[in-house]
Image (tube, rainbow, N blue to C red):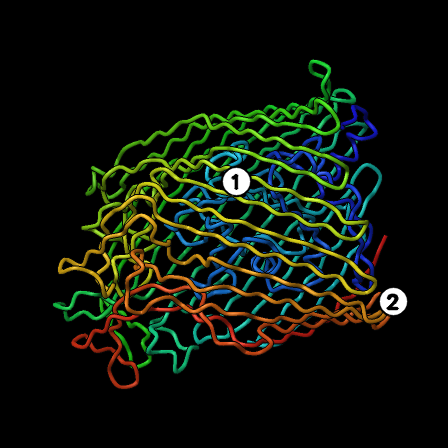
Amino acid sequence: MIRSSRSLALPCLLLILTGQVRAADPPNGGIQELPAIVVTGALPLPGLGLPLRDIAGNLQSVRGMDIGRQHAGNITEYLEQNLGSVTVNAAQGNPYQPDVSYRGFTASPLLGTPQGLSVFQDGVRINEPFGDVVNWDLLPLAAIAGLQVIPGSNPVFGLNTLGGAIAISTKSGSSHPGGQLELSGGSFGRKTWELEHGGRAGKLDYFVTANDSAERGWAEHNPSLVRQLFGKIGYRISDTRVELSLTAANNDLHGAQTIPRSFLDNPRQAYTFPDENQNRASLWSLSGSHFFSETVQLSGNAYYRNYSNRNLSSNVNGDVNSAIEASNARAAVLQDSYGMSLQLSRLGRLAAMDNQLAIGISGDLAQASFTQFSQDAQFTARRDTVGIAPYALVTDARTVNSNLGLFFSDTLSWNPRWSGTVSARYNLARVSMADQTGLQALLNGTHEFSRINPGLGLSYHPHPGLTAYGGYNQGMRTPTAIELACADPNAPCSLPNAFIADPPLKPVIAKTAEFGARGKLGATSNWSAAMFRTTLADDLQFISSSGAASSTGYFQNVGATRRQGLEFSARTVRDKLAATLSYSHIEARYLTAYRERSASNSSADGNGDIQVLPGNRMPGLPQNSLKLRLDYTATPDWDIAASLLLRSAIYARGDENNQDRNGTVAGYFLVNLDAIYTLAKNLQLFARVDNLFNRQYANFAVLGQNYFNGPGHTFDGGNILTEQFVAPGAPRGAWLGLRYLWYK
């Protein structure tokens, strides 16, 4: 039952702002007992918080100290190895640019990938307005205080929340005083330093973290240089708190693409190169909260984000009648975005029932320019491209995105055993495009989408250690400028793609139902189980055109699709051993028949088309995944852990009818190790080994045409083979580091 008192409200606010109230991390990184009380935020902005028992969904929470203990290379590695129903693929060939999927929905850094997850940092939506992409390389791991994965099409999180939302909260000096310095290095030439420090001075507090990581990459031609900075200043007087934060990054990331199966004699080689992304970003965020009384709180934020991406990609020409073998494409996205949100929360009574009400409004505006230049090129014997002509302008377009949202959420507890939540959000989205060349007047125009999405949830608590729940909600995804301008099967685009005037696309509507239960077994064990089904109307998919690269194709509404499944997780602590298990089974299938151009599919007809039928599995998504982590405190100074990741087989993109003769890409399992040893009071030695048994595997595939069938895999335009292109996973890697800590 929710208590209406300042003694509860203020700690809840602090908990949501920081992800978890945290004393200094224990020097030995030892096993922690399960928290007795979990207060969670199920709203875009920090609020008063709800007990987990009132959340009608299988919400997953992670503390920043748990992320730091494992020393994963980046946040996506941690998500893949620890969170249920999360899978990752290496389609871009760079460890900082994976596609992250949750319950069959994706958050990807690749322009044009159909996005189905919304991602928030301290209440600011960080899906880039241009393409709704998520750049996982921009936020330092050390800045994360907590992370929550909110399941389903929760309407209060707004656009793109088809399968779920990821809410990240960052550290502050009040919650994380003291600091640490880390130095590490190891396989693939990786060298990293990382510094963080926080503290308080009267009513002010501060936190800053910075890092620099460089590596040559495990494959050829895929080095990475990642430089990240996060800083926050906070000011608190009485019942008011204000925070100003800056997140900045300056990263150079090279990819290795997918390679044909015939290249697997050396999985480190690239199909063609160079392929480079330069990401530059800065996010200024001003947030605040004020308690008007013991039960009424106003919170809000305002932000400015500047983002630029410069891409260089090498491509096979694909025109067998042309003497030009290749092309180089240079593309640039320059974006400025602004926004603000307000949320009013109130604890009280309604018709003799405990009630928590939140209402809010959000507005976002973004302006972006997209330019692309193309250059004729030839291949060398190493398959890199050499330009043979000047760069020529292909695209120069401007886009404007504006989004308005109005939402509310109301939770009632009519007795100690029952609680229910009703929520809704109105979204109004506009996408305007304007051609700057004067040659594509049909591109100019404005597209508008609006809808009210509802949500309902019911929770039953027969006793303090058990909760059963059920929920239903709806969400919407609007087509992005990239998709609206690349929807013609007769004119496939490469991504980042050229803008042309194409048929209009419909918004995607998601409807999710979920039923589940969670509970505790004593003070050191808990479990959760859930069944879910999300049905999409007018699902929007990227359709491969079966070129030489996985990024050539077009976008199409393909009718109805469905993701459904079940998931189970459990955690227990017994003396020195902690064990965490999660399993998920997800079926992602088409429900509507449609024809698709996929000439590289062996079952294609004479026109290069395939027939996708209801019941066919969607490509790229494994049906089964299992994760097991064992954490053992051998001595007070030594902690060692092993993680097992198992994934089942997937279909390749282009094999949407599941009939290609290459069949599926085999499943695999990986074992990783990590350990921490305390050398002195404030000095730790840590180590990590990924892919302990050096398994060879692939986690993504696409059907395409291989033009490199000459001696030594050199270019041969007269001998083109249809193959399955795969994204090989990284081989065994090991890293060693030192961490020096200081506390306040």
Which residue in the protein does label 1 denote?
152
Tag of residue 612: none
- As rendered, which of 13 and 451 lies closer to the eye? 451
CA separation in Å, label 1 and label 2: 45 Å
Q: Quadrant of the N terminus?
A: top right
The reply, left or right, for residue 706 in relation to residue 56 is left
Specify the quadrant of the image occupied by residue 382: bottom left
23 or 698, which is in the foreground? 698
Residues tagged 1 and 2 counted as in contact (Cβ below 8 A): no
Q: Secondary structure at mark 1?
A: loop
Residue 670 percent location from the top left of the image: 56, 70
Type of amino acid at the residue the image marks with label 2 = Lys
Q: In the image, is 652 to the left or to the right of 118?
A: left
Q: From the top left corner, tell me how far across and down residue 104 is, in percent.
A: 46, 50
From the viewer's perspective, is the residue at label 1 or at label 2 nearer?
1
Report the residue marked by disc 2.
Answer: 681
- Residue 319, quarter of the rendered image: bottom left
Residue at 48 percent across and 42 percent down: it is: 533
For the point 31% across and 69% down, the residue is 662
| Farthest front residue in view | 462
Q: Taking 590 as reference, is 235 above or below it?
A: above
Assign a secondary structure to mark 2: loop
Please tell me how crowded label 2 is: few (under 14), some (14-19), or many (20+) other residues with Cα within 10 Å. few
Name the residue furthest bottom: 711
Q: Earlier in the sequence, mark 1 or mark 2?
A: 1
Residue type pointed to by label 1: Gly
Q: Residues within 10 Å of mark 1 (few under 14, many from 20)?
A: many
Task: Give the percent coordinates (x, y) of residue 368.
Answer: 40, 42
Residue 433 left/right relative to 518: left
Position in image of residue 702 (x %, y %): 34, 63
State left or right for residue 435 relative to residue 348. Answer: left
- Foreground: 325 or 413? 413
